[in-house]
Image (tube, rainbow, N blue to C red):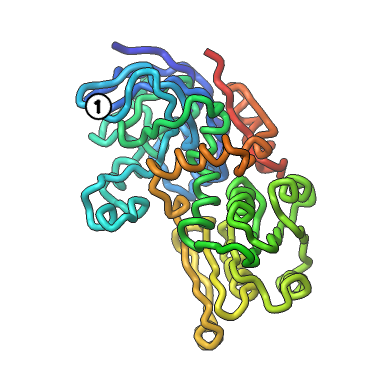
Amino acid sequence: MIKNTEAAVLYETNSDLVVENLNLAAPGPKEVFVQMGAAGVCHSDVHVISGQANQIMPCVLGHEGAGLVTSIGKEVNNVSVGDHVVLSWLPYCGKCYQCVRGKTHLCKAYQTPVGNGTLLDGSCRFSNSEGPVRQLGSLGCWSENVVVPEVCCVPVDKSIPFEIAALLGCAVTTGVGAVLNRAKVKKGETVVVIGAGGVGLSVIMGAKLQGASKIICIDQNKNTKKLAMELGATDFFIPANNQDAHNKIIDVTSVGADHVFEAVGKRELQSDAIDCCCSGGTVTFVGLDSEDATINLKTTAITRAEKTISGSIYGSACTHRDFALYGEKFLEGKLPIDLMVNRRYHLREINIALSDMLEGKPGRGVIVFDH
């Protein structure tokens, strides 16, 4: 059975997305048909548009989304018709070395098909008159309907609105998870967050959830201050330079921060993050720069100060555990994800949504699907 679906397709780098009707094949074995409810607009999609991500095209973009399961293929055991699911762009096998030791976010079993934008068997379910169309991260959330691998579907409480559930699929899990799973921030510790995009704002929420005594947000966009403070930041700075940032943090913390999170993905800011950290503190890189990015490390100073520098991909999360957990925290009022959603668009407004994000409008833009 072939269905038509409206989708946002990228045909070439540094160009607008084309919203058009595509053919969508029925789910095969271990695949699920999802009617999309909402999808977030994330900077990672811009990395694809700019060419930084080296995505094969044409490709339906969007990797942060949630929706309703309307049909399933053969051999699907963990998802049922009627489930509300959050989609994960980092599926895991559950059997490899990393999965067995509890680090499912480091599983590489499906790296090739996910990176190529196909389903796990290497084929495509989207197509047009010219041939197959790929889907970003094996998802392609900027489509009215998608067919995705069962392992990419995580059922969540149906009382969570789709626009909230969608953000669990990337920004919230990446930021909150970096705080809880990777850095393991403790009550009373001090936190610096560099960058107040969707991920940085989620780091702030995670730090507040953990009871951090000071949450200092550093960003160049004054329009993000109000939202950052609403989500839990205790201080907000727009520094003139690295030294200015360091001085301001010392003024607030006396010794530097226990934890510094770089949530932008720029090598110069990663270097700044190390300088903002106190002796014995931890720096966590959450944002992604280009594949060849490097920074110079003052190794003797790091050794003497016993600073820990680490990275966190996808919030170091086990998605089947953490999507549900963070959804529960939202329902309990402990993660105010709804405050992040302040721009809603129809799919045909996707290029406007991307422009608004790049202009620095605070919070998260969300594509809402009307069915």
Q: Quadrant of residue 163?
A: top right
Drawn side of residue 214 relative to residue 19, left or right: right
Residue drawn at (45%, 48%) of the image: 53
* Rendered view: 253 above or below 287: below
Drawn side of residue 299 relative to residue 356, left or right: left
Residue drawn at (53%, 64%) of the image: 284
In this view of the protein, which residue sits in the foreground, 289 or 179? Answer: 179
Residue drawn at (42%, 50%) of the image: 317
Q: Is any atom of residue 50 visible in this view? A: no
Which element is circle 1 on? loop
* Rendered view: 187 above or below 331: below
Q: Is any atom of residue 223 visible in this view? A: yes
x then y, percent, for residue 102: 32, 55
x then y, percent, for residue 335: 60, 43
* Rendered view: 69 above or below 169: above
x then y, percent, for residue 249: 73, 71
x then y, percent, for residue 325: 47, 42
> Which residue is under mark 1?
76
Assess disc 1: are there few (<14), some (14-19) or many (≥20) residues with their C-alpha within 10 Å of its C-alpha. some
Q: How many marks?
A: 1
In this view of the protein, which residue sits in the foreground, 53 or 28? Answer: 28
In this view of the protein, which residue sits in the foreground, 268 or 263? Answer: 263
Residue drawn at (25%, 21%) of the image: 73
At label 1, which amino acid type do we have?
Val
* Rendered view: 27 above or below 286: above
